[in-house]
Image (cartoon, grey):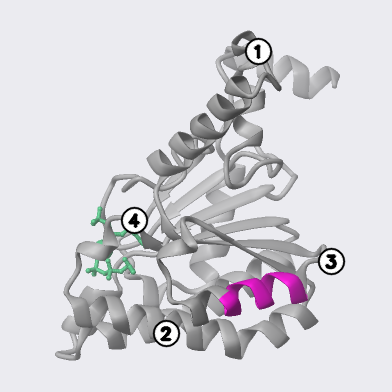
Amino acid sequence: MMQAEPPKHIAVIMDGNGRWAQNRSRPRIWGHRQGVDAVRRTVRVCIEQGVPHLTLFAFSSENWHRPEDEVSGLMNLFLKVLTSEVKSLNKNGVRLNIIGDISRFSPKLQSQIQLAQDMTASNETLVLNIAANYGGQWDIAQAAKNLAYQVAEGKIQPQDINESLLGKHLSLSCQPDVDLLIRTGGDYRISNFLLWHLAYAEMYFTQTLWPDFSEEELINAIRAFHCRERRFGQTSQQIQEFAFHG
Ligand code: IPE
Ligand code: IPE
Ligand code: MG
């Protein structure tokens, strides 16, 4: 059954940069640099297709375990791209929102993140969440800790805690759950990305390595999403009756 509405929230695990470079006998960081073009393409298509929320996995909490030169190369790249892209993102109505534990980043990177977020704060065309030093388990744990403090301070009661309240304390707080998850690079796993918000996401896995991920493939992924029947626990018949009668 076709769904006319564009997905409200697309999340992407941008995987395969290292292999893309190694296939060309180049250092892995070169693949990360090439991946930036695929990010630009993805943002452009989301704006054109009317997708209001996009979350990109840029650096996981586990990626610190990579060789030191790759980690520092990624940090430098992050700083460079954040600085060079913010104007054009702003011009295109993109609101930048970095999610993850940024306290481990250099003061320079932290202040650039703050600057980019402040500069784009009132934009409404697309919310672009960049997950950096992000882990889905960390996100749920920090929300739980926050609620525990509120209970200890007497601001809320333990029985007030439910899915809705916990959800509000996650990094994406009031943003809609993910409709479509895309993972490039050929693996079929979540790698500690948005665990909570993927509850009912449709999954699109592709062998394509991230630097090769094209506008056409993103549009195809959105088309594939439109062909899925999302039942949210109901029966197919219930969904079809609702679509017919409204
Ligand atoms: C994803 O590409 C980007 C980051 C994790 C920062 P990889 O660097 O994981 O590329 P592969 O999976 O090794 O090819
Ligand atoms: C997931 O890719 C993290 C990002 C894309 C930033 P990884 O390459 O780190 O995932 P694993 O380690 O293969 O699961
Ligand atoms: Mg990888």
- Specify few, some or many for label 3: CA neighbours under 10 Å numbering under 14, 14-19, or 20 or more: few
Q: Secondary structure at mark 3?
A: loop
Q: Nearer the viewer, residue 190 or 168?
A: 168
Q: Which residue is mark 1?
A: 157
State which region is magenta: 111-119
CA gap, disc 3 and disc 2: 26 Å
Mark 3 or mark 1: which comes first in sequence?
Answer: 3
Q: Nearer the viewer, residue 163 or 178?
A: 163
Q: Which residue is mark 3?
A: 122
Q: Are marks 3 and 2 in contact (CB under 8 Å)?
A: no
Q: Which residue is mark 4?
A: 61
Q: Are marks 4 and 2 in contact (CB under 8 Å)?
A: no
CA gap, disc 2 and disc 1: 44 Å
Callout 3: CB less than 8 Å from ligand 2 = no
In the displayed structure, 208 sits above or below 204; it is below
Mark 3 or mark 4: which comes first in sequence?
Answer: 4
Mark number, residue 77: 2
The residue depicted at 28 percent of the width and 84 percent of the height is 29
Q: Is residue 194 left or right of residue 48?
A: left
Q: Quadrant of residue 5?
A: top right
Mark 4 or mark 2: which comes first in sequence?
Answer: 4
Looking at the rendered structure, the kind of residue marked 2 is Leu
Looking at the rendered structure, the kind of residue marked 3 is Ser
In the displayed structure, 194 sits above or below 48; it is above
